Image (cartoon, rainbow, N blue to C red):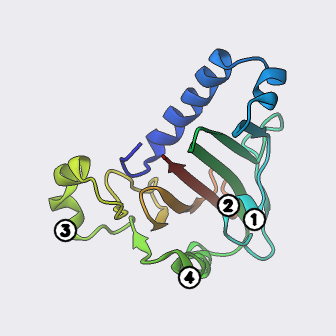
Amino acid sequence: MSKPFSLAALFAALSFAVISLLAAPSPARAQNEKGAGITIAGDADAKDIGLPLYPGSHRYKDKDSDSPGVNFDLWGSGSGFKLAVLKLQSDDSLDKIADYYKKHLSKFGKVLDCSHPSPNDSANKDKDKDDKSNVLTCGDDKPDSGGQLFKAGTKADQHLVSIQPNPNGQGTRIDLVHLAHWDK
């Protein structure tokens, strides 16, 4: 996967995970194969995401039966894939939360504001699809209506923060994502 992360890629990655699981050897065999493994957890934490949880926030579920996060790792033969997602909710404003996460995202490099992409991002959209560099761009990623979206890192190891008004009208929803892949 050399393309930049997009929200559509999240769904593709989860589909890939399910297909990989169905095609994978039995768990006993996978555990005995040296240097390969899979981790699937129905939740994620700050360590999995690589970002702190917003102070005073709490985990958010769309429905009672949903999980507020997911943590998926698949590796073997020097290659691997990681996807960690955590949904939070806060009573604070979008701008206050955005300021907090822009500061923390900066430890991964330049923080991209995909809410207001620069003209260069639009001009380089087609070039980006063929770009073999590891420079992260917004690409086709954009926030939901009324929201904000920030990214930092590289194409191979990126962190994403999506902030939007909560659909139920109470507070602000925060989605934290860590997506990484590596090859030999």
Distance from label 3 to label 1 (Cα)? 32 Å
Pointer 2 with pointer 4, Cβ within 8 A: no
Distance from label 2 to label 4 (Cα)? 18 Å
Of the image marks 2 and 4, the number of the one nearer the N terminus: 2
Please name the residue that numbered disc 3 is placed on: 120
Residue 93 numbered tag: none
Pointer 1 with pointer 2, Cβ within 8 A: yes
Residue depth check, mark 2 versus mark 4: number of the one nearer the observer: 2
Please name the residue that numbered disc 2 is placed on: 49
Please name the residue that numbered disc 4 is placed on: 99
Counting from the top left corner in percent of width and height, residue 9 is at 46, 40
Of the image marks 4 and 3, the number of the one nearer the N terminus: 4
Of the image marks 3 and 1, the number of the one nearer the N terminus: 1
Of the image marks 1 and 4, the number of the one nearer the N terminus: 1
Residue 46 numbered tag: 1
Residue depth check, mark 4 versus mark 3: number of the one nearer the observer: 3
